[in-house]
Image (cartoon, coloured by chain):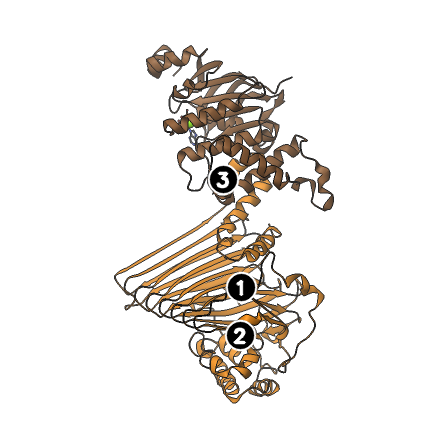
Chain colours: A brown, B orange
Amino acid sequence: MGTDLVIRDLHVSVEGKPILRGLNLEVKQGEIHALMGPNGSGKSTLAYTLMGHPKYHVDRGEVLLGGENLLAMDASARAQKGLFLAFQYPVTVPGVTLANFLRSAVSAVRRARGQLAVEAAGDGASPQEVLIPMRQFRRELLERMRALGIEEEFARRYLNEGFSGGEKKRIEILQLAMLEPKIAILDETDSGLDIDALRTVAEGIKRLAGPELGVLLITHYQRILNYITPHYVHVLLDGQIVESGGPELATTLEAKGYDWVREKHASVA
Amino acid sequence: MTVETLQQWSAEAVEALSAAKAEPSWMRERRLAAWRCFEELAWPSGTEEEWRRTDLRGLHLEAYAPLPPVPPARQEEVPAVLQPHLALPETALGGLLLQQDGVPLRCELEPELRRQGVVFCPLEAAVQEYPELVAPYFMTQAVPAAMSKFTALHGALWQGGVFLYVPRGVQVALPLRALTVHGRAASLQQAHVLLVADEQAQVTFIEEQLSCAEDLPGLYNGVVEIFTQRGAQVTVLQIQNWSRRLWGFAYQRALLAEDSHLRWAVAGLGSRLHWTSLGVVLRGRGSSSRLFGLTLTDGRQHLDYQTLQDHQAPHTESDLLFKSALLGRSRTVFRGVIWLRPQAQHTNAYQADHSLLLSPHARADSLPILEIEADDVRCKHGSTTGRIDDEQLFYLMSRGLSAQEAQRMIVEGFLETVIAEFPVAGCQERLRQLVAARI
Ligand SMILES: Nc1ncnc2c1ncn2[C@@H]1O[C@H](COP(=O)(O)OP(=O)(O)O)[C@@H](O)[C@H]1O
Ligand SMILES: [Mg+2]
């Protein structure tokens, strides 16, 4: 059985203000879903809620990952189960190098998935502290950095500190590649990128997509869909999915704009 | 603070100490002069700006005895507890000086450095052998005995310490390291560090302070004096890791001559209570300094730093960055004075201090004080006090780290940006280990 993401009748509020109002969506491993919507429609709210940000309050509904209740888990347990979020605004963590951080994160995730030999801790280290061997980690990291066109020196730099917008997005995809999730949510990974950066990032995502990975590609614009063809396209408006269809829906949106959806669903707002 | 007539503290005790060390008369005179200052000066009342935030009421001076006089040239075996501290990870040293309770246990200096005229030895030995190098500097300009009751006591009864002299133009490539060890329970430790870098000299000096046991009671009353002569480039790194039952007081000053540069980084990890006055005096045109500090406190620890960036000459520059992470009921005080004197035109002075509160009961006070008497200057300060950032925590947890791992990483990262400013790999490694063991 696949590790599918199932969202049913999801209602979410932030600081007492309802944002998502009955959202339904299923993303199976191997599928690519594009979620489009105007600014403020609730796309990031959905992303943060799925990942377990404590600020987002689920008022109603359920979210399952591989049949398990995702809402009962904290963010780290969700990540360990195979969920990943590429942030629209990646966070800076001074003093923590990308390499150090990723080694701990990859180790935590692999430990949880039973992919890291815990017996290696024989010499006194407690099982929670077992890290992936340095040489193996470096090899994997450098290989994936190369594939994404990221300079080696980034491994020693502090997480997102002083990175350009494009670099941050690329580093998000690098983390996605290292953590090997089952379901990845990409929150506007395409925004703020020039055309070259967009191509690199899109190609990176495309290489990772496959039967093992389900993708929820959140985007405001249609342009990333020139590189990645989604199986499904959904339109989010005022906290509800109001249209769903195939790739042609994105083209219609591009041509007619969000006002077209807004008028069509005036009753929702 | 309880102050009673202390039998061990008297003019006779000063004379006896000086005699036991067979000191030259100039040092004996200085000790006695310091003693007279001590008798005249009062202990801080707690109303002075520098002492307002450090409560000395729990300090019982009579509980601490001065160390027995150490006759010159005594050298003993290195106790087993100190063996692990002798080397710094992955770091070659140019010299090592180990002292416990004022007794020299190791004095090593690369023969080549010795040949070039570098002096790195216990201060007592230098008083005997190099009076012409010590006398002009010892408690005359940087930290005069009359500065306070503490410095006067120090001047009268100091024992142990380091003298480092680097002759003109000599560049010491490998760091020189001193380990100052507190091993005797309830003792008064009064080590004195005197560093003189002559014109165009370059040197890196590391001082690590530690106790033989975590719970060893003690009182430390230290003085550090640093002189950088014209064009000298000096790095001083200090790690304070005394026992959790030691009360510490330190007056530390650097005097910078023309075009000299000082990088001075300090870490405060140990002590029950530690009050430190740390100042750079930019006396020479074109001199510059960079000060860094990090502290990690827990339990009921109390660390107080009174810093001074005193610009007395034009075209001088100073920069200061302090970071404190606080656990438990611990408390830190940072009071940072920048003083730009009228003659200090074309100067830049910066100061930033940041505190990370990891417990609802911890408290950090920050008081920047800017005295600007020159007009063509740039002066900036910034200060923040906060808790672990929720967005950082969520970001790290979203990658699979547990809440605990993520917090740990954020705290280590917070301090790491200062650890990275200790430009000796072994010091950085030591600090990372000490920090990791505490969070
Ligand atoms: N952390 C937050 N605090 C307060 N309001 C928020 C927060 N996150 C989202 N909102 C509000 O929720 C609505 C949807 O925002 P968001 O989910 O960011 O939309 P999108 O990502 O589609 O642009 C907006 O009205 C926004 O102001
Ligand atoms: Mg958004």
Q: Position of residue B89 (x, y in %)?
A: 61, 57
Q: Position of residue B74 (x, y in %)?
A: 65, 79
**Chain identifier of the residue bearing label 2 in the image:** B
Identify the residue position indicated by label 2 in the image.
Answer: B115
Identify the residue position indicated by label 1 in the image.
Answer: B175
> Disc number at residue A152?
3
Mark 3 lies on a secondary structure that is helix
Q: Is residue A263 left or right of residue B14?
A: left
Q: Position of residue B256 (x, y in %)?
A: 39, 69
Mark 2 lies on a secondary structure that is helix
Q: Do marks 3 and 2 share a chain?
A: no
Depth check: give the residue in front, B385 or A79.
A79
Mark 1: amino acid: Pro
B362 is higher (above) or lower (below) than A100: below
Q: Contact (CB < 8 A) between labels 2 and 1?
A: no
Q: Do marks 2 and 1 share a chain?
A: yes
Mark 2: amino acid: Arg
**Chain identifier of the residue bearing label 3 in the image:** A
Q: Quadrant location of the N terminus of chain B?
A: bottom right
B214 is higher (above) or lower (below) than A133: below
Q: Do marks 3 and 1 share a chain?
A: no
